[in-house]
Amino acid sequence: MNRFAPKNLLRHGLTLIFGLSFGSFLVGCNPTNIPIGPTSINSRYTDEQPSLSANGRFLAFVSNRNGSRNILLYDLQNRQFADLPGLNRQNAIADSPSISNTARYIVYLTSNQGRSSVILYDRITRGSQVIYQPYQGWIRNPKISPDGRYIVFESGGRGQWDIEVLDRGPSIELDLIDGVPSGFSLTGPQ
Amino acid sequence: MKRFLLIPMVSLVSLLSSCTTYPRLLNFTFDPSGRSLNSPSDDITPQISGRFITFVSDRQGRQDVYLFDGNTRRLVDIPGLNQLDILASHPGISEDGRYIVFAGTRQGQSNIYLHDRETRQLRNLTENFKAEVRNPVISADGSTIAFESSANGQWDLMILDARSGQPLDIPITPR
């Protein structure tokens, strides 16, 4: 059978055209506005406030690309951005990201009408929750412990900056590497 | 008689139930003499890794890095880290407590320093940088360091291998 017979050429050509148009259709309809394709951490805009996962594989940061201020998560091993569905919202400014061991938990700060809150995002359940919101006063710079149990931050409630430690409790799912607890505790022997 | 019982009952119930609500703020004793986590001065930019909390405080009249052991609830000495001519900010610590990274300003020049608590050595990771640097972080295993650099006239991210001090081979240049 001759591959270059006019009939076969036509068939291959048609397959190619259909394939290309279908591919471009998929790409064009991708609803996310975060550039997943480009593999660059830095952009022509400000990229700041880095946070690293335990073995340095994931990098979370704040970027001003795409016309708004968003938290991005980059996989340094696979050289691509990870999806964070539901994390970045249009009407809230997200700031100061901090990630746990495998970047399962992302803790960050939002400000809404002058009130700041510490938000915890879980990449497995894809859900966010307000983990701390003071009645009054400012909070800054939240950081999550590698296992995800504790969150430290600055609080201005006493008229100066103090350090607060939030305990998520013994019943949470820890973000452990190979399932091995670190053996550290902040509520253990004192 | 019943009325007298009511008050202790209510307080006991509220005490018990308050013990089980999470998340909750931990209570660290406030020490006016500056030997604990919080002091009468500003205590800022805390970072937690394992049992350690590292932060910056001006409780001694100068801006230094402090290390708090959450297990023993005591400050830990970090000899060789705080230098008289370096203003320190934004410390971060590895989970084993060995490596502390921080931004230091010396004679108007900002650099990223890595302190090894085992050898008590202080290393300047950005000695040859012609840019301002800030906000360093270290991964929990101590292998990787990320920080911000002003080399391109805006804040960009730099990622270094902590051991060699060399930039990681990843695309980080502006598109």
Image (cartoon, coloured by chain):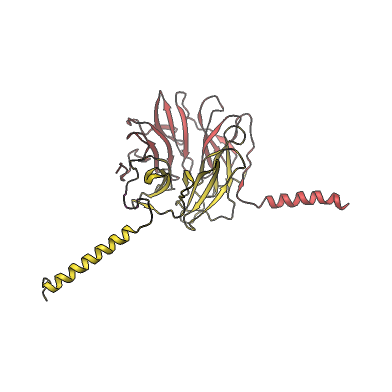
Q: Left or right: A140 with respect to B155?
A: right
| Residue depicted at 62% across the width and 29% down the height | B33
Say if residue B48 shows up in the picture. Answer: no
In the figure, residue B32 lies in which quadrant?
top right
Seen in the picture, residue A64 relative to A26 is either above or below; the reply is above
The answer to which of A134 and B138 lies nearer the viewer is: A134
Find out whether residue B53 is within the magenta segment: no
- Residue farthest toward the bottom in the current orientation of the protein: A1
Seen in the picture, residue A138 relative to B17 is either above or below; the reply is above
Seen in the picture, residue B74 relative to B17 is either above or below; the reply is above
Q: Which residues are magenta?
A: A35-39
Q: Position of residue B98 (x, y in %)?
A: 46, 39
The answer to which of B33 and A123 lies nearer the viewer is: A123
Which of the image's four quarters has the C terminus of chain A?
Answer: top right
| Residue depicted at 30% across the width and 61% down the height | A25
Seen in the picture, residue A20 relative to A34 is either above or below; the reply is below
Q: Position of residue B154 (x, y in %)?
A: 36, 35
Q: Main secondary structure of the magenta part?
A: loop
Say if residue A74 shows up in the picture. Answer: yes
Q: Position of residue B137 (x, y in %)?
A: 43, 40
| Drawing shade for chain A | yellow
| Residue depicted at 42% across the width and 37% down the height | B136
| Residue depicted at 47% across the width and 32% down the height | B89
Which of the image's four quarters has the N terminus of chain A?
Answer: bottom left
| Drawing shade for chain B | red
